[in-house]
Image: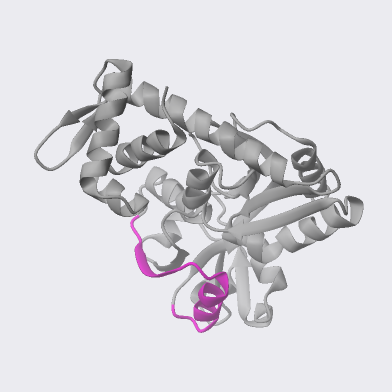
Amino acid sequence: MATLKQLRTFIAVAETLKMSEAAKRLYLSQPTVSQIIAELEKEYETTFFKRYPKHLELTPMGKLFWDRALNVLNSYETLNQSMKSTTVIRPLRVGATLTIGDTMISDIIQKLQENHPDISCSVLIENTKILENRLIHNEIDLALVEGVILNDKIHTEPIMEDELQLVCSKDHPFSGRDTIKASDLCNCEFILREVGSGTRSIFENLMQTHHIPYTVKWESYSASAILDSVARNLGIGVISTRYVKNNSRADVLKTRPIKDMPMNRYFYLCYNECHSFNSQMADFKDAAKSME
């Protein structure tokens, strides 16, 4: 029977597809990692990896074992979390994307703890792609994200609406118009969120659908940096209207809808299908929905 150490080692190898990289991640020697994988393959009388000179490739049995190993480790981490908590405190690990983290997560957590003081909540703010990975590895219990997660291991449900709009300086030619057409954006210079963010993905998918060429002049994790550079007329941006309403430079920024390219979206509540939907997760969901 596989041990937890063997499962963690296998997962590291499956994710990196290199014994040396897995060894570095686990602070083990490469021969130790190789031996653990060999022991697992002997135990289950199968081959998990095809060996090539510079990399590995998962076999069908390897992919199956990876999926099962993640389930086991997720269950183990859930058991650890539940046993570490007292009967009084209900722990909750929340992930939030940057838009949500900057504009509303504090309000949600404040309301949650006002209504349920027995919940001890920790928050991690990252982009959608990183939070998806943390959900898979059971590093957080749930996440509220602005992007779309397609991984079939993760349950997602829309929980509130949001709107993206074009934002420009009051000195930009677009500021004098009531609306902008998609074709007006051709070859414009944009200041955008980083690759991996939900906002960036939605914008790029729409521009590709409409076959509109554009230039990414700047990109940033920081919405404040984006709005500051847009306010100085260094480019135009696409961002949640929630940001502009709360920004101190709202007087020099203009938001404009794109007439034939609406950018309405949802924020999604997400959690690993292997993670039981416990009472504190349900209470968080109710608090989030009350913010609509």
Quadrant containing the N terminus is top left
Is 278 or 237 nearer to us in this picture?
278
Image side of residue 115 versus residue 287, left or right:
right
Residue at the spot 46% in from the left edge and 35% down from the top edge? 4
State which region is magenta.
213-234
Q: Nearer the viewer, residue 13 or 144?
A: 13
Q: Does the magenta stretch include residue 159?
A: no
* Residue 165 shows up from this direction: no
**Residue positioned 58% across, 74% down in the render:** 176
Residue 278's x, y, as percent?
Answer: 75, 35
Q: Nearer the viewer, residue 225 or 37?
A: 37
* Horizontal arrangement in the rendering, residue 259 relative to residue 70 (left or right): right
In the image: residue 157, left or right of residue 259? right
Note whether 93 is above or below 240 in the view shown. Answer: above
* Residue 112 position within the rendered picture, expressed as x and y whole percent measured from the top left: 83, 53
Question: Percent position (x, y) of residue 65?
Answer: 38, 24
List the single residue furthest toward the top. 45
Residue 249, visible in the rendered structure? yes
Residue 98 position by quadrant: bottom right
In the image, residue 227 sits, relative to residue 151, either above or below, namely below
